[in-house]
Amino acid sequence: MGKTELYSLFKAFLDCLCLCIPWGRDEALVENERDTESGHLIYRGGDILESRYEIVDTLGEGTFGKVVQCFDHGRGGRPVALKIIKNLEKYREAAKLEIHVLEKITERDPDNKHHCVQMLEWFNYYGHVCISFELLSLSTFDFQKANNFLPYPINQIRHMAHQICHAVSFLHDNKLTHTDLKPENILFVNSDFSLVHNAEKKCSEKRVKDTTVRLIDFGSATFDHEHHSTVISTRHYRAPEVILELGWSHPCDVWSIGCILFEYYKGSTLYQTHDNKEHLAMMESVLGPLPQRMIQRSRKQKYFHRGRLDWNESSKAGRYVKAKCKPLTKYLLSHGTEHHHFFNLLEKMLEYEPSKRITLPSALTHPFFVYQARSKVWRNSCDMSR
């Protein structure tokens, strides 16, 4: 028998053998067919990873990869969220850093009392780092979007704000800065809602029944001793010291929280822009002139002329800023005491100077929270009057 015939028989034997092996659907894929060109794992509903995680549906997608809902058969079929990182080296390395942060959080908060999402397990699946979490519900952004961007009622804002401040204060106590706080990264544990009539808007609106939230996405979280990237935070929640390249620390998270709480209250972002100088002009329209000390120390002198922001109010961009932005207190929806307390807290969170910005332990004792406790209205679905 010649070499060619031997090779043909051997190949036929291997083909038969492969047909007999009980491969899973995704395991049967050869390496270059398992992933998309961009590095995402190819999967379908019903696929099972690690003989344990049964994929049900896709929950979301980002530059890092995808998040899917699974039944965790290793935990009795418990529903979980599984974050599947792209099969690319830079995302794998970032995932390892996030896992380190999540492990620290679990170590310091074993009973899950500090409102941060709980990591359950992590594993490597054919080059994809996978992290399983408790399954949560809609983000505070997605709920507001589904509600036509109507504001959250002040009492709901208070409860969410208290939890957010508590969670981020816990991070700061453990020498961590989140660096990417935004409504998309704050999820409701349960986003079930009731429909109520909004007399002012003359429409029905969704009212979430339980405002318990969890803070998520620690992929950019940075320990105090680690290298601090020059640019952090999603644009609309970026602190002035970051834009001016003055260095940053825990106070940049406090600024982001102030922007988030305003968005909950108004239904729109405080600073809707994608340009640094325009962003600074908006800040000045809302909060007044930037401090001279920050301007003088900034590495971004191109934004300034003779110690002031180089900004033409008569330009197209200038007219846009003038139309979009007004002094902070002009956004008050009511002159009730709790609204004024809320805006006083916002002013302290949106202090330009990081060293003068309110700390979160101090924020948690602010009259906005104390007033509620004294009024005995601390509950999730209380009087929702604005």
Image (tube, rainbow, N blue to C red):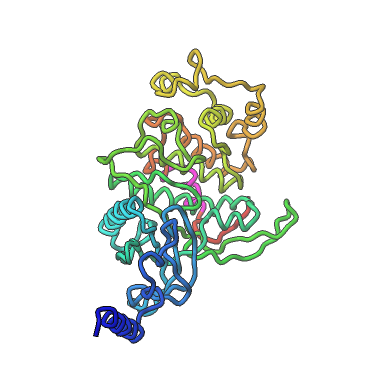
On the image, which quarter does residue 325 sit in? top right
Q: Is residue 253 above or below residue 125?
A: above
Residue at the image position 40 percent from the left and 37 percent from the top:
231
Q: Quadrant of the N terminus?
A: bottom left
275 lies left or right of 201? left
Q: How many marks?
A: 0
Q: Is residue 265 above or below residue 384?
A: above
Q: Is residue 112 above or below residue 251?
A: below
Where is residue 299? Give x, y as percent. Answer: 40, 23
Task: Say which of 247 and 60 sits in front.
Answer: 60
Q: Is residue 328 magenta?
A: no
Residue 73 image-quadrant placement: bottom left
Position of residue 90 measured from the top left corner of the image (x, y, whole percent):
34, 50
Q: Indicate whether residue 369 is drawn in magenta.
A: yes
Region of the chain picked out in magenta, as a range:
364-375
Q: Nearer the viewer, residue 208 or 26?
A: 26
Task: Residue at the far top: name it.
Answer: 306
